[in-house]
Image (cartoon, rainbow, N blue to C red):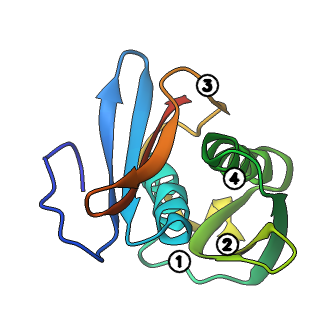
Amino acid sequence: MGGETPVRRRGEGGHRTVPHTADVRVEAWGANREQCLGEAVLGLVECFADVSAAHADAVRRVRLAEESDEDLLADLLDEVVYRLDAHGEVPVDVEVESTEAGELDVRLAVAPLARVRMTGSVPKAVSWSDLRMGPDPYGWSCGATVDV
């Protein structure tokens, strides 16, 4: 999506990346919190890789404890950065659901980093500065600055 200003409609999800001094800003939105979190993951991936032609060869499940919305966003994006660094895996699709046990169940469909086209620097960390997530007039939105 690049840096253009998106037109938002109620119930729709999306994401964009915005240049930030020596970093990248990922902004995402969705009809609900779970869709917003999934879009944030896709936005993070989009800042360094083109996964449009990639096919997943595994699904990784992650359970995150229900904390503050900002904590969930940071924890999920940190998980993606960890999987890139430790396992060389990049998400090509994501599903996020809340469980009755009060956790977030995340399924990351992943492909080896070596099989995707790199378009930028691989992220190193998620910054707590300017981290935000919450309801808005269209559903939910979030933003995170990513160190590259």
Left or right of 115? Residue 71 is right
Residue type (three-letter) at the residue carrying disc 3: Trp
Looking at the rendered structure, the secondary structure element under dot 2 is strand
Residue type (three-letter) at the residue carrying disc 2: Ala
**Where is residue 39 drawn, in percent x and y?**
46, 63
> How many angstroms separate mark 2 from mark 4 (CA)?
17 Å
Q: Residue at x 81, y 80 (%)?
A: 100
Q: Nearer the viewer, residue 13 or 41?
A: 13
> How many angstroms separate mark 3 from mark 1 (CA)?
30 Å
Looking at the rendered structure, the secondary structure element under dot 4 is helix
Residue 128's mark? 3
Q: Nearer the viewer, residue 56 or 108?
A: 108
Q: Earlier in the sequence, mark 2 or mark 4?
A: 4
Asked if the residue under mark 2 is in contact with the one under mark 1, i.e. CB atoms within 8 Å, the reply is: yes
> How many angstroms separate mark 4 from mark 1 (CA)?
21 Å
Residue designated by label 4: 76
Front label number (2 vs 4): 4
Residue designated by label 2: 111
Q: Residue at x 82, y 67 (%)?
A: 62
Q: Earlier in the sequence, mark 3 or mark 1?
A: 1
Q: Earlier in the sequence, mark 2 or mark 3?
A: 2
Front label number (2 vs 3): 3
